[in-house]
Amino acid sequence: MAEDKHSKTEQPTSRKLQKARQEGQVVQSQEMLSAVTLLTLVLTAAMCGPWFLNWSKEKMRGAFTCDVSFMDNTQVFCDFLNSLILESMLIAAPFMLLLVLTGTAGSILIGGLNFSTKSLQWKLENISPVRGLKSLFSPESLVKLGLSVLKIICIALIVWFYLSDKLNLLATLQWMDSGQLMEAIARIIFGVVIRICLGLLIIGVIDLFYQKWRYIDRLKMSKQEVKYEHRDTDGPPELKTKIRQKQFETAMRRMLQEVPKANVVLVNPDHVAVALRYDPDKMATPVVAAKGADHMCEKIKEIARAYGIPILRRPPLARELYATVKLGHPIPEKLYTAVAEILALIYRLRHTR
């Protein structure tokens, strides 16, 4: 196993990553999700805190000053409790909904939108005691333990330094009235909690980077696996060679079919041949209808002779056209004069005949 793990040095291919996602394996960071969810809850509570406090005061005031005679009627009392419970649920619903949306959005942002039923399938090895014992001493368990210890230390340090800075304020709480006391305590609690959330967010970022690295490391492949996957994806090399050869032959046949439509063939004379086509009614400039070297050069000249296409020996021009102009593309502007002289010569020869 150690050798097998050591041999997996290649980054996972896109196909391997896609297959992992189909099996429900995506990057997830519980530390990051917890930190973001807690931070969202604290900020929401801070924004809605005054309104929620006024609602609570109103309900408590109503509970202490209400007419207790309605308690004599069981039905009326049950209706009162039901309305109070329903109102409390409506008050808490936005907070619960926000937590659900935050958790869902965080999971999507971290691991992407993915749905797989394979991760829900029951597997016997998941309840194996041996596997459970191994997971207790796995690197992931050690990382989780380290993060837990880091969180405790981080929270303790944040609370210590924050409250140490607020000692003067804490000493004056005994002289405040109830309203000022509640406000001061709320501010202190909010200051501590928001700093704890930011500290947990930093730990969450560390865990997120670790989980991404762990995810890629777990999916790494050996050179042989990459080779096999490319073979399965693209087919055997022999088949790819045959396909490329077939495509090349088809392209050459299609190109040679354009030679009879050419006006002139320029040659090197024995190594390069370029067939030019120009129709003044349809084209703005001449185009390279066909070109080839060595064997293909002889083939182009053979077809040109069979169809009576003029063959002119122009070595520099033929070499430059062959090297710089693609099939079916117009000639460059710097060669207009040279090609125009050749086309004019062909035109005069034909009319002389």
Image: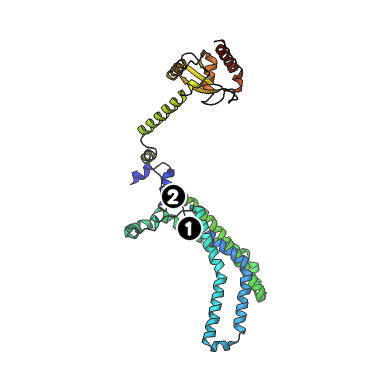
Image vertical order of residue 20 relative to residue 55, above or below: above
- The quadrant in which residue 341 appears is top right
Position of residue 218 in the picture relative to residue 277 (left or right): left
Let me know if residue 163 appears in the view. Answer: no
Image vertical order of residue 209 relative to residue 230, above or below: below
Q: Earlier in the sequence, mark 1 or mark 2?
A: 1
Image vertical order of residue 89 relative to residue 16, above or below: below
**x, y (%) of residue 31?**
49, 58
**x, y (%) of residue 168?**
65, 67
Question: How packed is label 2: few (under 14 Cα within 10 Å), some, or many (20 or more)?
Answer: some
Q: Which residue appears at 62% of the width and 74% of the height?
A: 55
Q: Which residue appears at 40% of the width and 28% of the height?
A: 245
Residue of label 2: 215
Position of residue 161 in the picture relative to residue 303 (left or right): right
**x, y (%) of residue 315?**
52, 14
Looking at the rendering, in which quadrant would you find the C terminus? top right
Find numbered disc 2 in the image and state the secondary structure of the residue it sits on.
helix
**Which dot marks residue 296?**
none
Residue of label 1: 30
**x, y (%) of residue 210?**
47, 51
Image vertical order of residue 344 relative to residue 214, above or below: above
Residue type, mark 1 in image: Gln
**Image mark count:** 2
Find numbered disc 1 in the image and state the secondary structure of the residue it sits on.
helix
Let me know if residue 48 appears in the view. Answer: yes
Question: How packed is label 1: few (under 14 Cα within 10 Å), some, or many (20 or more)?
Answer: some
Q: Nearer the viewer, residue 281 or 157?
A: 281
Q: Nearer the viewer, residue 186 or 250?
A: 250
Q: Nearer the viewer, residue 12 or 339?
A: 339
